[in-house]
Image (tube, rainbow, N blue to C red):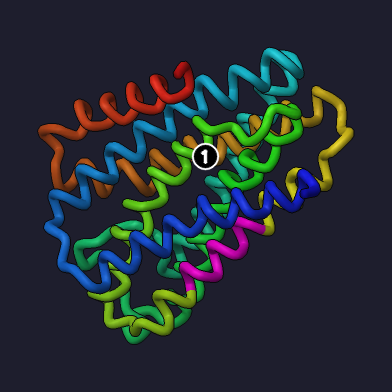
Amino acid sequence: MPVWFEAGLWGLLAGGALVVGAAVAWVVTVPPRAVATVMAFGAGVLVSALSFDLVDEAETTGGLVPTLGGFLGGAVAYLGANLLLARRGARHRKRSGGHQPSEAQQAGSGAAIAIGALLDGVPESVVLGLTLLEGQGVGLSVLAAIFISNLPEGLSSAAGMKQAGRGAGYVFGVWVSIAAASGAAGLLGCLLLDGASDATVAAITAVAAGAILTMIADTMLPEAFERDHLYTGLVVSLGFLVAFTISRA
C-alpha cells in the first residue's frame, strides 16, 4: 500500500471519531458536565501530543528557527481565520449549551460553523500524514490523541447544532464531510511533502501544532471550563498524562 494512501486512511479514521461523537449526541442526551469533562480530557491529550510528538520532533529534526516560525505562523493564521468565522456565527461551534445561533438568528451561520469545523480538523490530519514520512509507520500517540480529542469535539458541537434547530442531514453532512476532508488532508500532507527537507517538514508540523494549540484555547477549553470549572484543570492534566504515557509506551 502506498504511504500516501495509508496516510489518507489514518486521517479518515481519526476524522471518523467526529462522526461517532456526533451520533452519540444525536441519539442520547449527554449531561453538559459529562460533555465538559470529556472535552477537557481531549484538550489535555492534544496538548501532550503537540508538546512531545510535534513541536519537540520538529525542533529535533528541522531546527529551532523553522519550528518557532511555523508555530507562530500557525497560531496567527488560525486566529485570523477564526476571527472571520466568529463574525459570521461560528464562534461557539464547539459549544453544546445553546450558544450556537440558528440560521434564523444569523443567516450564514450554518456554513460558517461547517467551515470552522473544517478549520479545526485539517491541521491535525496533516500532521498525522507527516508522521508516516519517518518510515516507521503512523505515529500511534498522535493518532490516539487526535481520535480521543475528536470524540468530545463531535459530541459537543453536534449537541449545540441540534439545540440550534439544525437537522440530522446538516449535522451528519458536516461531520461526514469533515471526516472525508481529514482523510484527504492526511493523504496530501504525506504526498506533497514526501522528499521535502527536514526544515520544511518541521515548519509545516509546527504550523499545524500552533493552529491546534490556538484551537484548544479558543474553542475547547471555554466549553470545558464553563460547565465544569472546578475540575477542568485536573481533567486536562489527566488527559495530558494519558497521552504522554501512550507516547512513551
Q: Residue at x 58, y 57 (%)?
A: 12
| Nearest the eye: 53 or 132 | 132
Quarter of the image that includes the C terminus: top left
Residue 77 percent across, percent down from the top left: 62, 45
Q: Is residue 87 above or below residue 245?
A: below
- Residue 122 counted in the magenta span: no
Residue 87 percent across, percent down from the top left: 45, 64
Q: In which quarter of the image is residue 216?
A: top left
Q: Residue at x 74, y 53 (%)?
A: 5
The residue that mark 1 highlights is: 143
Residue 139 percent across, percent down from the top left: 59, 32
Query: Which span of residues is magenta-colored?
Result: 174-183
Q: Residue at x 63, y 57 (%)?
A: 183
Q: In the picture provided, is 77 more to the left or to the right than 199?
A: left
Q: Residue at x 39, y 44 (%)?
A: 149
Q: Can residue 92 be seen in this view?
A: no
Residue 80 percent across, percent down from the top left: 57, 49
Q: Helix, strand, or loop for circle 1?
A: helix
Q: Quadrant of residue 131?
A: top right
Mark 1 packing: few (<14 Cα in 10 Å), some, or many (20+)? many
Instruction: Tell me the amino acid under the disc marked 1.
Output: Leu
Q: Can residue 58 be seen in this view?
A: yes
Q: In the picture provided, is 40 more to the left or to the right than 119?
A: left
